[in-house]
Image: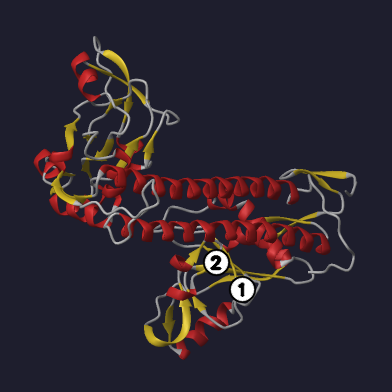
């Protein structure tokens, strides 16, 4: 590792003595923006992007618009984005401050997006992209909010302080971070593929189009039976709210968001504290294999989102706006029922039953009358086990992804401030 004296900078603290801090305009040949007007879209012409097309550090050209050659010429003459340039959303309520690194060679026009064009002998384009991403949150805080939409002024972008290592060191840092991004992208693709495979598997297994093997390695051949939900489970609607009432018993409460954001309810969740009557505790305490669904919501599409209680929670009580689907143990497996509630067909059924104006809800009668075709219990259990294993594989990949992102974030912080140096081959150039 390189050793070098440090110098103090008021914005960044100690940085290596060979590094400089400059305003972005000193390291860029141009900082401008695209049109603020809305040109007429045409079926076929030159690509044209707006702020919504800046996503995850890239430009979404697959869903871009098109403008006439005449409009493009006017807009492009103003900003001429090219491969290696940095694009920053400088007007817009949704993703103000988001950026993208241009990776295409063809011409395109843009609206409400700023262009920062690095000087190739001073600022490595990819280094600049990573540097901006590392400070994006701070930059976004400088957005002006006085007008109809928040905006980042070109003046502020020109004054953006940029820490500049020597150009060959910038190049090496950028390559290291790009390697991490490629690893992250690989895991993301694996997760997407695994989710698609699980979705297809659910469709086959939960409809009987594909039958698994039993414990004797023979295909299941038992007859599937059409039943109402009330035939195989007890429906319990909880009235326990989040309030702490004097004189009631303190309890731990599973609330709406616990169910909405998790497919399984376990002790690892951070349950809230509330109070309840003894009669409520006796009736609404959650049990292993209960399936909890969202009974009420502000939108009908969020009705009947399920989560499985997959372990003993030690007395956690079900909260308001939820319903407990308690399986009859000899007829239906809770894990199987949880997957069944996740099926688009089931979600659509409850969507059609939701009633309300500003808040939507399900009646107990509507939940009871849900209609399913169920295989024998042993086949249900085998199907649930296969799908649970698929979920565990996705969760493992997701944990790997989260770890990679956290490690990359820490590495960026070190590399882009000089706290960690890289070995540079003098032959490496931007």
Q: Residue sitting at 90 percent across and 44 percent down?
A: 5
Q: Nearer the viewer, residue 333 or 237?
A: 333
Q: Which residue is mark 2?
A: 58
Q: Residue sitting at 47 percent across and 90 percent down?
A: 69
Q: Secondary structure at mark 1?
A: loop
Q: Quadrant of residue 338?
A: top left
Q: Quadrant of residue 76?
A: bottom right
Mark 2 is surrounded, within 10 Å at the Cα level, by few (under 14), some (14 to 19) or many (20 or more) other residues, namely: some
Q: Position of residue 128 (x, y in %)?
A: 68, 62
Q: Secondary structure at mark 2?
A: strand
Q: Residue sitting at 80 percent across and 57 percent down?
A: 165
Instruction: Give the distance between the C-alpha atoms of the residues marked 2 and 1, in whole angstroms.
Output: 8 Å
> The C terminus lies in which quarter of the figure?
bottom right
Q: Nearer the viewer, residue 110 or 77?
A: 110
Q: Position of residue 325 (x, y in %)?
A: 22, 36
> Which mark, by number, is residue 103?
1
Q: Is residue 409 left or right of residue 20?
A: left
Residues at discs 2 and 1 in contact (Cβ within 8 Å):
yes
Q: Position of residue 426 (x, y in %)?
A: 90, 65
Q: Is residue 182 visible?
A: yes
Residue 186 vs 325, above or below: the answer is below
The mark nearer the N terminus, 2 or 1, is 2
Q: Is residue 17 left or right of residue 101?
A: right
Q: Is residue 316 left or right of residue 101?
A: left
Q: Position of residue 79 (x, y in %)?
A: 58, 77
Q: Is residue 421 left or right of residue 313?
A: right
Q: Residue furthest top?
A: 247
């Amino acid at each position: 590792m390189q050793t070098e004296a440090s110098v103090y900078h008021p914005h960044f603290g100690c940085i290596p003595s060979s590094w400089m801090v400059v305003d972005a305009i000193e390291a860029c040949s141009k900082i401008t923006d695209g049109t603020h007007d809305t040109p007429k879209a045409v079926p076929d012409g030159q690509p044209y992007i707006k702020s919504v097309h800046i996503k995850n550090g890239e430009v979404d050209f697959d869903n871009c618009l098109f403008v006439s050659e005449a409009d493009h010429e006017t807009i492009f003459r103003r900003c001429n984005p090219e491969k290696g340039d940095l694009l920053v959303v400088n007007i817009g309520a949704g993703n103000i401050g988001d950026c993208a690194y241009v990776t295409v060679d063809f011409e395109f026009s843009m609206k409400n997006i700023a262009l920062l064009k690095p000087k190739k002998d001073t600022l490595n384009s990819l280094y600049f992209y990573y540097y901006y991403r590392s400070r994006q949150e701070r930059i976004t805080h400088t957005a002006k909010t006085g007008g109809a939409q928040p905006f980042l002024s070109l003046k502020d972008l020109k004054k953006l302080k940029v820490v500049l290592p020597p150009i060959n060191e910038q190049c090496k840092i950028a390559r290291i971070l790009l390697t991490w991004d490629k690893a992250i992208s690989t895991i993301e693709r694996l997760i997407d593929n695994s989710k698609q495979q699980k979705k297809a598997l659910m469709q086959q297994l939960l409809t009987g189009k594909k039958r698994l093997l039993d414990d004797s390695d023979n295909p299941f051949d038992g007859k599937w039976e059409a039943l109402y939900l009330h035939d195989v489970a007890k429906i319990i609607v909880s009235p326990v709210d989040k309030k702490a009432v004097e004189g009631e018993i303190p309890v731990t409460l599973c609330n709406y968001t616990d169910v909405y954001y998790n497919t399984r309810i376990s002790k690892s969740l951070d349950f809230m504290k509330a109070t309840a009557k003894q009669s409520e505790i006796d009736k609404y305490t959650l049990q292993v294999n209960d399936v909890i669904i969202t009974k009420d919501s502000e939108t009908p599409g969020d009705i009947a989102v399920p989560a499985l209680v997959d372990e003993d929670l030690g007395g956690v009580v079900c909260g308001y706006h939820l319903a407990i689907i308690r399986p009859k143990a000899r007829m239906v497996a809770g894990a199987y029922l949880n997957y069944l509630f996740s099926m688009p067909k089931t979600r659509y059924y409850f969507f059609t039953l939701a009633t309300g104006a500003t808040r939507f809800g399900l009646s107990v009668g509507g939940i009871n009358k849900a209609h399913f075709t169920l295989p024998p219990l042993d086949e249900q259990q085998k199907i649930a086990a296969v799908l649970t294993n698929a979920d565990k594989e996705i969760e493992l990949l997701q944990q790997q992804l989260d770890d990679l992102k956290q490690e990359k974030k820490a590495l960026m912080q070190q590399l882009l401030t000089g706290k960690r140096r890289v070995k540079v081959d003098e032959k490496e150039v931007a």
